[in-house]
Image (cartoon, grey):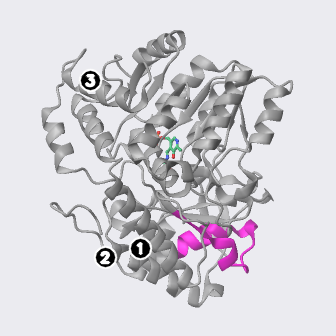
Amino acid sequence: MEPYRIKVVEPIPITTRDYRERRYAEAGYNQFNLTAEDVTIDLLSDSGTGALSAEQQAAGMRGDETYAGSRSWFRFREVTEELTGYEHILPVHQGRAAERILFSALLKPGQLSVSNTHFDTTRANVELAGGVVRDLPSPAFADLDSDEPFKGNIDLVALEELLEGPEDVGLVLMTITNNGGGGQPVSMANLKAVRKLCRRHGVPFILDAARFAENAWLVTQREEKYRDHSPREVAKKAFRLADGCVLSLKKDGIVHIGGMLALQDTELAKQCELLLIATEGFSTYGGLSGRDLDMCAQGLMEVTDPLYLRERAEATAYLADCAREAGVDSVRPAGVHAVYLNAGRLLPHIPPSRFTGHALASELYLAGGIRCAEVGSLYLGDIDSSGDLITPAPFELVRLAIPRRVYTRSHLEYVAETLAGIAKNPEQVPGYRLTEIPPILRPFRCRLKQI
Ligand code: F0G
């Protein structure tokens, strides 16, 4: 059960199918164009959508809004230093600001950023800095149905080959957990091997640690050597394997806004600090209020609580199990922050060119007011200017991202029931065609129609 009880509640909109059909058509069949009033259960993102604890709210009240050197900053620094062990801590307003600053300082034009999988803003920021991304996901991820424990790993053979070859690698970035790769965890053994390879080749090793606590939890559950460790001990060890991290605190900081860049290298940190002051704010607040810094510090203490992590992982697995019983498969084994539904398998009558994942995500909205996003050809496919799919994504998935401490099991059961209703008559679900295609960031701004 949840190791907390609810003290503040917020009504959620209960709407009719007619209303949703009208609103979704007005939204150009793009869920990013829906408003809060249109959505009953919002599984679009687990980022910045969590519920604050009473202690976080109290910490917020203690927030010190002094421009430079506030007490909130020192509290934030104490907690983040103790957790990560990094010497230089730079607060930023959210994860992508840390990415932009780090890559601008670190990457030379044409240099590679190599990862288990770059998250989409991470990819965009590498490219904006003149770098080139290379994803080397573990081959185990190719089988969505296998129960391999660490499908989020990087492919070590491919990484070693790349580092020994002629290409110029600027950094290796390990995303824990691997959000672009089914929310799957990375093992400590994999991180250790990456560290060794990076050391040997003199390449910086950085963590994208947005879900560091959830990764640590799965390590304690799935990696023999760490069974007796607490999630916090594992998280601390993971941070200490790398040379620094970019960290969106909107996930495992359990705050609505916040992020950080932390580094060991003093020269690099100095360059980043100047960029931070120029673009985010002075280095003791970095675009955050004192209140935010205090709430982040408190959230970082709470998030490694094993009782909280166990319940969250079990709730996610419960949703995946209910969906499977209803006939909807998802990427196995279940991770923590999201369930990735296998839309391709449920809707074989809709080809990737008609956006299978988007079709399932749309039906979840129309049938139940549930908002979520596809991770398939609409997002990852190669699409020409007339909207035709040239190269499909490897899989047609739908991500049900679960906000932290927000929904109860009965909300998840409602999601599973809605899925069960869809699975009874999957052939009635229509496909989609693009009508407006922005040149970049397609999923956010595109419009579609049903066909
Ligand atoms: N890295 C990972 C692995 C992420 O999942 C995200 C954000 C970021 C970096 C960027 O952080 O949003 O604070 O700027 N992921 C959100 C999501 C948006 O829904 O998965 P940010």
Locate residue 346, reporting x and y percent: 65, 79
Q: Secondary structure at mark 1?
A: loop
Amino acid type, callout 3: Trp
Residue 367 forms part of the magenta stretch? no
In the image, what residue occupies the spot 42% across and 54% down?
46
Q: Which residues are magenta?
A: 339-363
Q: Amino acid at mark 1?
A: Gly
User: For the residue carrying disc 1, how many other residues have a C-alpha within 10 Å: few (<14), some (14-19), or many (20+)?
Assistant: many
Residue at 26% x, 23% y: name it.
73
Mark 2 — residue?
14
Going from N to C along the chain, the mark reached first, 3 or 1, is: 3
As drawn, 212 above or below 403 = above
Q: Quadrant of residue 356?
A: bottom right
Q: Position of 328 compared to 132: left or right?
A: left
Task: Say whether residue 14 is left or right of residue 237.
Answer: left
Q: Amino acid at mark 2?
A: Ile
Where is the C terminus found, in terms of image quarters?
bottom right
Residue at position x 64%, y 79% in the image: 430
Residue closer to the observer: 290 or 315: 315
Can you tell which quarter of the image residue 355 is in?
A: bottom right
How far across and how far down the image is residue 202, in percent?
70, 19
Pointer 1 residue: 369
Gap between marks 2 and 3 measured at Cα: 41 Å
- Mark sitting earlier along the chain (2/3): 2
Local packing at callout 2 (Cα closer than 10 Å; few below 14, some 14-19, many 20+) is: few
On the image, the x and y values in percent for residue 80 come to 36, 30
**Disc 3: which residue:** 73
